[in-house]
Image: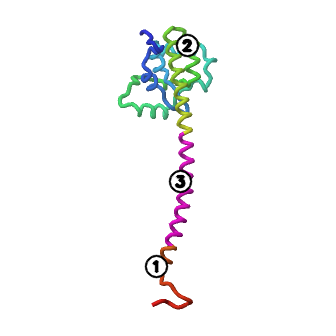
Amino acid sequence: MKSTSTGSIIPEEKIMDKIYFIRGQKVMLDKDLAELYGVETKRLNEQVRRNIERFPEDFMFQLTEEEMQNLMSQFATSSWGGTRKFPVVFTEYGVLMLSSVLNSHRAIQVNIQIMRIYARLRTLLLTHKDILLKLEQMEKQIIENREDISHIFAALKKLVQQSNEPRTKIGYKLP
């Protein structure tokens, strides 16, 4: 596959669709990465095992049965075939480290693309975090304003009720 003018050899949407949120982290499945790199999943995992000291637990981990079930429930059709082992997933750091153990030109180019997408996602998440903080501040202000408005309405009701009562002059009711 030839590189486009922006350096992308795979449509960004295809890569973004392969990023999942598991254990509070953005991760990619070994089989998806292997597909993107143009290698067999078995070969990718072989390279990782040969260089296991480069992949601590915060770089990669194996899914639990529950995580696998949750992940499979996100797909309408099962594309897992006869998988006997639960997949290994790679965090952003693990994907970055894969570039040091997979030396093909395609793997390097795909890795660069994935890292750029991760960076954009991080920026988006920070932007959303800022928006959420502003919304929370607005909500607090609305709650405070709601209380103030309630007090104003209570005072207005009191004034209206007082104005409906007959006026008296020096203790006597007017006819």
Q: Main secondary structure of the magenta part?
A: helix
Q: Residue furthest left?
A: 77
For residue 38, above or below residue 116: above
Taking the spot 53% from the left edge, 65% from the top edge, the residue there is: 152
- Is 86 part of what is drawn in magenta? no
Position of the N terminus by quadrant? top left
Which residue shows up at 48% across the image and 10% down it? 106
Q: Which residue is mark 1?
A: 164
Q: Tell me the CA gap for discs 1 and 2.
A: 87 Å
Amino acid residing under circle 3: Ile
Q: Secondary structure under badge 3?
A: helix
Q: Which residue sits at x=50%, y=90%?
A: 173
The residue carrying mark 3 is: 142
Q: Which residues are magenta?
A: 131-157
Mark 3 and 1 residues: CB-CB less than 8 Å, in contact?
no
Labels 2 and 3: the sequence-earlier one: 2
**Residue occupied by mark 2:** 47
